[in-house]
Amino acid sequence: MTDAALPPLRVPHATYQMNWPAALKALRKLLNDKNDTVQVFEIMRALNGAETVKSYHKLLDTVQGGRLAYERVELAERLTDRAFIQRFAPGTLGAAYRDFLDRTGYSADGLAEISKVGAKPIAAAHPYAWFGRRVRDQHDLWHVLTGYKADEGLGEACLVAFSYAQTKGLGWALIGVGAALRGGLFTPHARAIWEGYRHGRHAAWLMGEDWEANMAEPLEALRKRLRILPATRYEAIPPDQRDAVLKL
């Protein structure tokens, strides 16, 4: 596709107006079926569009953001390339991510396919769509980095709260509040979710990171550089009690 064929980069703000009825409808479906991950992306599409645009332009203002946007690497392709994943030494983020894949059976392309159900914009040949895909494909890396497990209700809920603090996307906030209400307010679960939000605010802005390069960095050193705090309240809850909240 030529540059002339691309939609205007500065699209009208009205294009990204929030659709609360659609978001609440999707949330109800998600609460009724906690494995219906398609509804997560419906909520994101309904509420997060404007913040994706703002974050893309924030990326361009970072030291390496212009290069990342120019290269426009599809992160999901890198993260599903087993030869790429296999090259990382023990103790690195890449090795921890490899262990995550082996333990959970998850994959970046699996999440990508779910995100395409019901709508096409995420697959568009446009910088905003590329950035949305890149944020989507960082999700499991953030699981590894924060220590919030992906195969537990509480682990997902804590990362949702962390993601809201990072992205400012109200879709994440809606899911996080729904998870907290499901688990019960003023419970250890709710306090762990709140801790996830506070840790997201404390951390560096992860959407501006060069994740391909970060994969080779020692995990603990990377956590320190990115100001990722230990998930104390989350870890204090026994693993067999962490599914008392929404499992996304």
Image (cartoon, grey):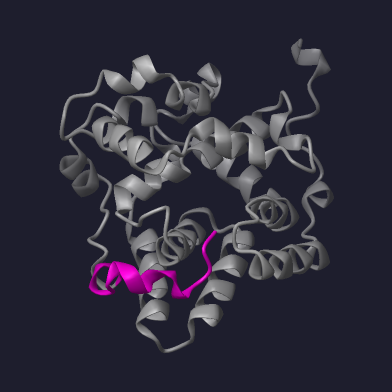
Picture residue at 61% right of the left edge, 39% below the top: 132
Q: Quadrant of the C terminus?
A: bottom right
Picture residue at 70% right of the left edge, 27% below the top: 126
Prevalent SS, magenta region: helix
In this orientation, does residue 60 appear? no
Q: Residue furthest top?
A: 2
Picture residue at 16% right of the left edge, 35% below the top: 91
- Residues 153 and 19: in front is 153
- Residues 241 and 46: in front is 241
Q: Is residue 46 left or right of residue 164?
A: right
> Where on the picture, by quarter, is residue 208?
top left
Residue 242 image point, x, y percent:
38, 70
Residue 55 image point, x, y percent:
56, 44
Q: In this view, does 108 lie to the left or right of 145?
A: right
Picture residue at 78% right of the left edge, 35% below the top: 120
Q: Is residue 227 left or right of residue 50?
A: left
- Which segment is the magenta one? 234-248
Q: Is residue 229 above or below residue 116?
A: below
Does the segment drawn in magenta span residue 177?
no
Residue 93 image point, x, y percent:
26, 35
In this orientation, does residue 241 appear? yes
Does the segment drawn in magenta span residue 241?
yes
Q: Is residue 244 above or below residue 53?
A: below
- Residues 102 and 25: in front is 102
The number of discs equals: 0
Q: In this view, does 205 lie to the left or right of 174?
A: left
Residue 234 image point, x, y percent:
30, 69
Q: Quadrant of the N terminus?
A: top right
- Residues 232 and 69: in front is 232
Q: In this view, does 78 lie above or below 54?
A: above
